[in-house]
Every structure is written in structure tokens, then in C-alpha cells.
Image (cartoon, grey):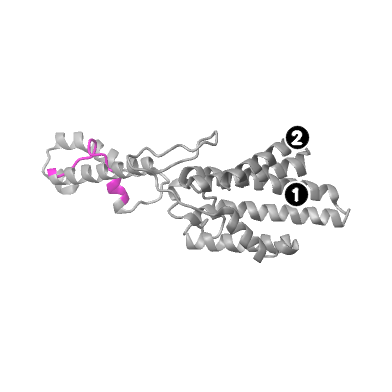
Amino acid sequence: RVSGFRRLGLEERRLVEPCVRRGSEEPKGARPRSRESRELSIDPSVAHFDNRSDRLEAETIEGDRREVEAERGERCVVMAEDGEAVRMEEAGEVERYDLSVFSSLRKTQTQQGMRHGDYLRYSKYCTRRLLRLYKSLKHTHGKGKYEKRELKACDVTEERYFLIPLMCAERVWAQAMEIKKEMENSKKWRGHRKQHMAKKLRKASKWADDFTKLCSARATSRTVLESEAYASFMKGTYLMEVEEKWQAALQQFLQTRALYEKLT
């Protein structure tokens, strides 16, 4: 600050000036920052202050910022690369939510065309419901260009968050079944349609796995069992329809049946 420099002699000013520059200079080509962001980036050990109150204020701001970042890191549950959920490191028990997976799916499928095998209508319904969920839960993907936003376990504050990966899996599964119906009715573009169906079923299996991981982190034990059964069914469908690995698909369907028996 200018008032601080006026009270210093020439020799003292030469010693202090580089420290002020290091604490306040902006890199070339960087966007101008607001006053609040500049205050948060001040390093109290480097920058020069006129009085002790300014230094204490800067140290308080820096300490609060680090405390918030540490608390955010402890409360967040991130998905590990191997697919297992890393549990939260906090003293209290994690709040868990309940979702009746199969009863809700049976109800929506019956009401949205699946009774008559109308997969196209059901996939369109899943798309509309996903948009409503994104908007109501404030889990949007930016304005204009799509920005991928990962759903983490620390974001879950109610059971409707589980419906996001579930509806994504249901949508691509319904699209794959619609393509399969087209292949049965027409032999035209059979190779292209088969590749398209394989891609959709692979995505459905991936979304089902993401649904299981999210439920394992924040759902009740019954919901976790239902999600595991759902993921096994999707994986078995992929192995049967695409890979044509009958034995592996049978094992997945048997696992689904065993999980169903645990629920009853």
C-alpha cells in the first residue's frame, strides 16, 4: 500500500517491494480477479501489511478457506478407480435412504407402454423424467454446451438421486429393445442395428453398475440388494444378446434370482 511505503525509508522500501509484488502481482494473460478472490489468495507470510489488524484478517481468511476445503474433502465420498466406494471419514453414521426399486419400475413400466411392448414410448418417458429430476434436484449440466457432471455420493440428500442412474439405464435398455424389435421385423441394416443395440446394452450395464455403487454408499441394505439384482440382470442381458456367452449369462440370471429370494 502507498501509505505504508511513505513511512518507510528508501532501503526498507527496496526490501519490502518484491514481497508486495509476489503477493499481489497477476500473471500475464490471466483474467482480472475480484477483490474477494485476491484477498483469499494472499499469503500472510509473504505479503506486506500496514498494521497488525490487516495481517490478522488475512490469516483468518486463509485459515477459514483451508478449513472449508478440509471439511469438504472429509464429507465427500468419491468413487475409487476400481469401482469400490471410499467411505466417509467422519464420526457420525452416514444417513441412508430407501428406494423401492422394483415396485417403482413395475409401476412406471406398466403405465408408460411396456404392457404392450412399446419400448419407444418408455424410452421417451425416461428422457422426460430425467430432465425433471435434473431440474428439481439442481443437478443440471451447464447452459448451452453439455458439461459432464459426475454424481457423487456426497451429493445425495434424498432418495430421488438414486433415480438418475436408474432412469439412464432404463432409457438405453428400452432403446436397445426397440432396436431388437426392428431387427426381428426387418432384415435391412441388420449389422448396423446389431452394433447399435450392443452399444446401448453396454451403456445400460454401465449405468446399472453406477446405480449399485451409489446405493452401496448411501442407501439402505434392502435397496442395495435390489440394485445388485438389477445390475446382474442388465449384465446377463448384455452377455446373452451381444456376447452370446450363454453360461456366463445364466450365472448372472441365477445370481439375480438368488438376490430376489433374499428380498422375499
Among the two numbered marks 2 and 1 on one chain, the one whose residue lies closer to the N terminus:
1
Q: CA distance from mark 2 to mark 1?
A: 21 Å
Q: Residues within 10 Å of mark 1 (few under 14, many from 20)?
A: many
The answer to whether residue 51 of the structure is visible from this angle is: no
Q: Is residue 46 found inside the magenta-colored segment of the image? A: yes
Mark number displayed over residue 40: none
Quarter of the image where one finds residue 24: top left
Give the farthest residue toward the right: 187
The answer to whether residue 78 of the structure is visible from this angle is: yes
Q: The residue under label 1 is which amino acid type?
A: Met
99 sits to left or right of 126:
left
Q: Position of residue 253 (x, y in %)?
A: 69, 41
Residue in front for this viewpoint, 61 or 132: 132
Q: Position of residue 219 (x, y in %)?
A: 48, 47
Q: Is residue 50 found inside the magenta-colored segment of the image? A: yes
> Which residue lies under the disc numbered 2?
247
